[in-house]
Amino acid sequence: MMFYSMETTMSILPQICLMVLGICLMLTEFREEGLLTSSDFNTDPGGKKYGLFHRNDFILPPGEGFGCSVGESRFYIVRRDDDLFRVYIARGRAPSGAVGRDRFGRFFTIRCNGIRDAMRIVRNIYIRMQ
């Protein structure tokens, strides 16, 4: 004896598929409009990469990194070596000086002892620019 009817399951399946497709389309539209993006950054090293970095055609560079913001400027800081960090500019003005460009976007490099120092240096640079 069967506890379910295959005919009932097959008759309900098209409605379920259409409902799931509709939800996916709605979520895609909300994401394109910017309604589902977070204004907060995950600043944990090696954490998830999400939020405003997926907007404005910014491509996340590979490697361990974290987000940082000063005012309206947004950055993504990636460790390249023990004391070398690359600061990608996701949104905002670039500081005057040696600003490079690669396939991931505009960046400048800084040398410091650790991630906290890198964040402090970037904030000081951009606070002086304002």
Image: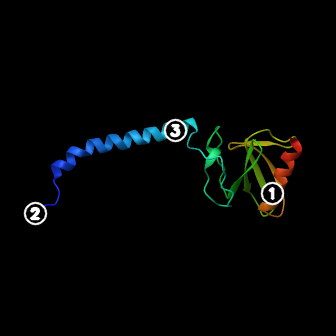
The spot of residue 129 in percent (x, y) is 87, 42
Q: Tell me the crowding category of disc 3: few under 14, some 14 to 19, or many 20 or more residues within 10 angstroms, Cα based.
A: few
Identify residue for label 2: 1
Q: Is residue 38 left or right of residue 80?
A: left
The quarter holding residue 83 reads bottom right
Q: Mark 2 and mark 1: span between their CA atoms?
A: 68 Å
The three-letter code of the residue at mark 1 reads: Ala
For the point 21% across and 47% down, the residue is 10
Q: Can residue 47 be seen in this snapshot?
A: yes
Outermost left residue: 1
What is the number of the mark on residue 2?
Answer: none
Identify residue for label 3: 30
The three-letter code of the residue at mark 2 reads: Met
Q: Secondary structure at mark 2?
A: loop
In contact (CB < 8 Å): disc 2 and disc 1:
no
Q: Earlier in the sequence, mark 3 or mark 1?
A: 3
For the point 82% across and 60% down, the residue is 117
The three-letter code of the residue at mark 3 reads: Phe
Viewer-nearest of discs 2 and 1: 2
Residue toward you, 30 or 48: 30
Identify residue for label 1: 118
Q: Earlier in the sequence, mark 2 or mark 1?
A: 2
For the image, the number of numbered tags is 3
Q: Mark 3 and mark 1: span between their CA atoms?
A: 34 Å
For the point 56% across and 35% down, the residue is 33
The quarter holding residue 85 reads bottom right
Q: Earlier in the sequence, mark 3 or mark 2?
A: 2
Q: Quadrant of the N terminus?
A: bottom left
The spot of residue 75 in percent (x, y) is 73, 47
Residue toward you, 95 or 18: 18
Q: Secondary structure at mark 1?
A: helix
Q: Is residue 13 left or right of residue 94?
A: left
